[in-house]
Image (tube, rainbow, N blue to C red):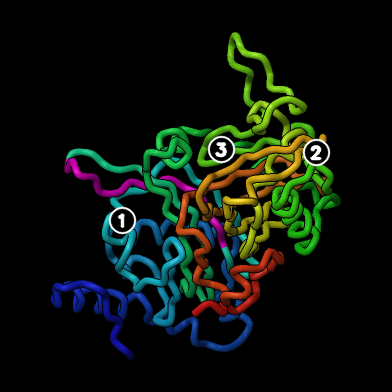
Amino acid sequence: MTEVLYPKADPRRIRRLARKLRAAVLVPAALLATGAAAQQQQTCDRACLEQFVIRYLDAVAADDPSKVPISRDVRFTENGQQLLIGDGLWNSMKAKGKYRLFVADPAAGQIGFFGTIQEDASDPDKFSGSLIALRLLVKNRQIVEIEQIVIRDRNDPIENSYGLVDNLPLHPKLTATVPLAERMSRADLVTQANKYFTGIQKNDGHGDYPFTPDCLRHENGHQATLAPTPAGETRPDPKVTSNYSNQWTCTEQFESGLMGFVSRIRDRRFVAVDEERGLVFSFAFFDHPAGETRHFKAADGRELVVGPVQPWTWELGEIFKIEKGKISKIDAFLHRSPYGMNSGWSTWAQGMSDVARDVTFEAPTGF
């Protein structure tokens, strides 16, 4: 077996982690057997996939790859960068947080996860709270792909959100089972979820916006729709204001046309589809090129100049709950990344394209 090396200066640590990974990737003999029984043993249902996430995070927190089965051919990215097992978050994570949201796709062996984690801090008596958007691909009871975005505290109020998310109750819609007669196909779930991205890109207020009246969106735990109007204030009027409001419904925000400064939503990768719960997990990038793209018209024809004044990209994971063809709940974990960066799982052309891709059964092409 080829020895796995780690980007550490200490050769003793390199040897130690390599030994642990070798132990972790040994395939149990039972999985090498043939026949229906062995095939059944290799499958991984919802509970199995969720347990893989827990075991993976425990392994990262312990800096010990042997605590979870990892393929020797595993592919691992963190915040769009390809890394070796043992690097990145493995060096700093100390414990799991309280918030846990799973999107399981047993048919594809994929699972998406939103959660909170604790990392090292400058003060050894404290920790730094972070958010993680994670995807694992599990085959033959081994992790073969790891993709994660770690959102760490910054001065930006949207990104500085650990405490808010860690104490956020899990919305009941996100775990509710869709009645069998109302379940949609994988393709239809992806199609409806993608209308959210299409509706924001160069938003003009006249698109197909499939939202329920009570559609609720959270971004890094912050309520982004249907927020109460603060005492002493007046609910913003879409016909007068230049910025969309978190007090509006999802439909009002989109029909206002006030998000036209988002010029491109690209590398739209749908990585887990949970038909039983009507959930879709995706990764994407929101580009704000600045310059002339800040000049656009609202839905009522008003000329506006809105949006970031310098090129800006959000890297994000997004989860959609779809009921009877309508989006009713949206959760996003996002952080600012270098403008125009790639996910590490797509070709350059795919990464710059706004075409939706269901990659749940697709081999990655970005390496």
Residue 188 lies in quadrant: bottom right
Is label 3 in a helix, a strand or a loop?
loop
Secondary structure of the magenta portion, mostly?
strand
Nearest to viewer (mark 3 / mark 2) = 2
Residue at (63% x, 18% y) in the render:
229
Residue 363 lies in quadrant: bottom right
**Residue 61 disc label:** 1
316 versus 40 height, above or below: above
Between 350 and 134, the one lying in front of the other is 350
Residue at (82% x, 34% y) in the render:
300
Q: Work out whether residue 352 can be spotted.
A: yes
Q: CA distance from mark 1 to mark 3?
A: 23 Å
| Residue 359 horizontal/vertical position (percent) | 64, 70
Residue type, label 2: Ala
User: CB of mark 3 within 8 Å of CB of mark 2?
Assistant: no
Between 177 and 205, the one lying in front of the other is 205
Between 81 and 348, the one lying in front of the other is 348
Residue at (63% x, 51% y) in the render:
292
Q: CA distance from mark 2 to mark 1?
A: 49 Å
**Residue extent of the magenta highlight:** 111-124
Instruction: Residue under label 3, please give it.
Output: 170
**Residue 299 disc label:** 2
Is label 2 in a helix, a strand or a loop?
loop
Residue 299 lies in quadrant: top right
Left or right side of 41 for 210:
right
